[in-house]
Image: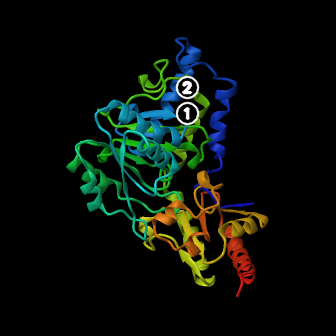
Amino acid sequence: MIYFDNNATTRVAPEVFEAIKPFLTEFYGNPSSAYDFGRAARKAHEKAREAVAALLGASDSEQIVFTSGGTESDNWAILGTLEANPNKKHIVTTRVEHEAVRKVCEKLERGDFEITWLDVNEEGFLDLETLRKSLRTDTALVSVMLANNETGILFPVEEIASVVKENSDALFHVDGVNAAGKVAVDLKNTLIDLFSVSGHKFHAPKGVGALYIKHGVEISPLYIGGGQENGKRAGTEAIHQTVALGAAANLVADLQAMKAIEKLRDNLEDEILQKIPNSRLNGTTDRTKRLPNTSSISFENINGEAILAKLSDAGIFVSTGSACNAQAHTASTVLQEMNIPYSQAMGAIRFSLGRYNTEKEVDFVLETLPQIIEGLDSLLPR
C-alpha cells in the first residue's frame, strides 16, 4: 500500500500509540477526582496541553482548550464568538474554506447574519485590500485558513491579522488544521485570536483537537455542564485522546522531517508535470507559498474519479480533493472558486505526502501513473 493522502488523515505514530495505552488500561481515573489516581490523569492531561501550546508557539498552556477535533474547534470559534457578541451580525471569510467553516457560514447566512465571501485569484490567493474594505463596525469575526487542504496554498495570516486589527475590532480566527505540524506556527508573536487544530492530521487518533484562545478573548462555550477545561468546555476529559495529541505534538514539533517530505513531493510533482501530457498544477508554482507536502495536479479531460480508482487498484491511495466532500461527485469547490476550467478541475488529483512515505514509493507512482493516464486518454472520443 502506498498512502499519499495525508491531508485527509494520517497514520497514528507508533510513539503516540504507545503513549495512549497506559491511559486505557492503568491510569484510567477521572482527572477531576481529588484522589491520587485522578491526579495522575490530570498531570498527564496538563502535560499534553503544554506540548500543544509549544507546537503552536502559544505564550502559555492555559490558552489551549481540548476539543473533539477540527470541526468542533472551527464551529466553536465561529458560533462562540457570535454568541458572545450578540449585537454583531457580520462575518468575513473566504470562498475556499473547509466545510467546517464554509457550511456554518452558509447556514448563518440563511438566518440573521451577513457573510462577506472573499474571492481568490487563479493561483488561490486573497486580495488583502478587498479584505480591508469588507471590514465593518459590526464585523464580529474574520475566519481564514492558514493552509488550504486541497491545494496547499498558504494564506499570509500574520498580514491578514494586522489588516483585521488595524481596521476593525473583530476577532480573527485561523483554521490551522492542515498546517499544524507541517509549517512553523508562533502564535505568541501574532495578532491571531483563535486557532484550530486537529490531531489526526499530525499522527494522533481521530476524535481529538484543540482551540487556541488568546488571553483576553471571550467566546461562549458550546457545551454546558461541568467546569472542565477551565469552564470553557464541559465534559469528562478523554485522557487517552489528549495524551495522544500531546505525544503527536511533541513528535511533529521538529520540522526537520518536513524537509525530506518536501524533497519527495518536489520530485513527484516535477516528474508528473514534465512527463505526462496535459498535466497542470493547481495553485501557485511558488513552493514557498504552499505546504511542503501537497500537490494538486489536474489531468485535462480525464475524470479524476477514474484516475483515483485505477490508482487504488494499483495499491496507491490519493484523493480528488477534500475527504470531507469526497462523495459529492462534482468538481472541487476550491478549484471552481479559483476559476480552474471544468475540463481541468474534474481531472484533479491531490497528492499529500507524510513522514512515512519513501523515495521508492514515489518512484512506483511515477512508473504507474503515466500508464494509467495514457490508458484513460485512449478511451476518450477523438
Task: Name the residue carrying label 2.
Answer: 237
Q: Nearer the viewer, residue 124 or 47?
A: 124
- Residue 138, how many percent across, how many down? 26, 41
Which numbered disc, 1 or 2, marks the residue that appears first in the sequence?
2
What amino acid type is highlighted by mark number 1?
Thr
Q: Is residue 300 left or right of residue 74?
A: right
* Residue 267 at least partly seen: no
**Tags 1 and 2 touching, CB below 8 Å:** yes
- Residue 114, how many percent across, how many down? 35, 45
Q: Residue at x 66, y 45 (%)?
A: 14
Task: Name the residue carrying label 1.
Answer: 242
Quarter in which the C terminus is drawn: bottom right
- Residue 209, how many percent across, how many down? 52, 39
Q: Is residue 69 left or right of residue 113?
A: right
What amino acid type is highlighted by mark number 2?
Glu
| 123 w.r.t. 214: above or below | below
* Residue 290 at least partly seen: yes
Q: Residue at x 46, y 25 (%)?
A: 229
Q: Is residue 307 left or right of residue 134?
A: right
Q: Residue at x 55, y 25 (%)?
A: 237
Q: CA distance from mark 1 to mark 2?
A: 8 Å
